[in-house]
Image (cartoon, grey):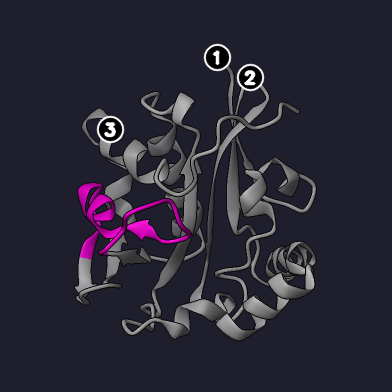
């Protein structure tokens, strides 16, 4: 089984799950996001956001391939590039952290350690760039797949609550701890990354 973790670019954006390719929940503020959806321009807005972040800040995601089939992804950026983050009652994200926006692994590929490898790859990337942590807004009332990750699942893989809230706590993961993760966190991490979207299959390359 060949595994590849490739930086997200405009060239492989099409390899994200269909619902995610045009989702601008994080990339635009609530008003602009709603307008983009209504006018049918959300896919273009997504491309524009990725292009701008790549040019200004650098890599902002990873796509995971198994035997050349896209099976997962993670998206992250400093909060200055994530307009929606300021709309949360537990904002702002700490200045030494990058925001974990969303992530996903296909259910059929969970339990293979891909989640751990993916997050460790992100951790190494961000540590090289001088960041110390990843922070995320969790959904404490999570009931179904959405753009926010379940707070309970974030806690299960090592995130700690830094600002509590009944609905949207802000959680933090120290990046150095991810580099020593072992197999005992794989099950929880797979559940976390599989909780975003549930689609039966992605098209092969």
Q: Quadrant of the C terminus?
A: top right
Residue 19 vs residue 158, the one in the foreground: 19
Asked whether 157 falls inside the magenta stretch, the response is: yes
Mark 3: few, some, or many residues within 10 Å (few <14, many ≥20)? some
> What whole-number distance in Å separates the C-alpha atoms at marks 3 and 2?
22 Å
Is the residue 28 above or below the residue 199 in the image? below
Q: Give the residues drawn in magenta, as a range.
A: 140-160
Question: Label 1 near label 2: C-beta < 8 Å?
Answer: yes
Q: Is residue 81 magenta?
A: no
The residue under label 3 is 187
Residue at 28 percent across and 54 percent down: it is 154
Measuring from the top left, give residue 134's x and y in whole percent: 38, 62
Q: How far apart are marks 3 and 1 (CA)?
A: 20 Å
Q: Label 2 near label 3: C-beta < 8 Å?
A: no
Mark 2 is surrounded, within 10 Å at the Cα level, by few (under 14), some (14 to 19) or many (20 or more) other residues, namely few
Tell me the tag on residue 39.
none
Outermost residue to the top = 1
Mark 2 or mark 1: which comes first in sequence?
1
Measure the C-alpha gap from mark 2 to mark 1: 6 Å
* Secondary element at tag 3: helix
Residue 1 bears which disc, if any?
Answer: 1
**Residue 56 placement (x, y as % from top left):** 70, 73
Identify the residue at horizontal 30%, vertical 33% (top origin).
186
């Amino acid at each position: 089984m060949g595994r590849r973790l490739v930086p997200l670019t405009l060239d492989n954006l099409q390899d994200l799950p269909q619902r995610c390719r045009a989702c601008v929940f994080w990339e635009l503020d609530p008003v602009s996001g709603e307008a983009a959806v209504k006018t049918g321009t959300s896919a273009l807005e997504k491309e524009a956001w990725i292009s701008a972040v790549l040019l200004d800040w650098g890599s902002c995601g990873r796509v995971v391939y198994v035997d050349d089939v896209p099976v997962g992804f993670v998206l992250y950026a400093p909060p200055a590039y994530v307009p929606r983050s300021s709309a949360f009652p537990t904002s702002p994200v700490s200045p030494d952290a990058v925001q974990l926006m969303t992530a996903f692994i296909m259910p059929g590929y969970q339990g293979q350690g891909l989640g751990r490898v993916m997050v460790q790859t992100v951790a190494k990337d961000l540590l090289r760039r001088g960041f110390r942590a990843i922070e995320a807004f969790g959904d404490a009332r999570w009931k179904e797949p959405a753009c926010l990750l379940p707070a309970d699942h974030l806690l299960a893989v090592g995130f700690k609550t830094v600002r509590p809230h009944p609905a949207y706590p802000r959680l933090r993961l120290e990046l150095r701890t991810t580099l020593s993760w072992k197999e005992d966190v794989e099950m929880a991490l797979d559940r976390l990354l599989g909780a975003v979207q549930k689609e039966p299959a992605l098209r092969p390359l």
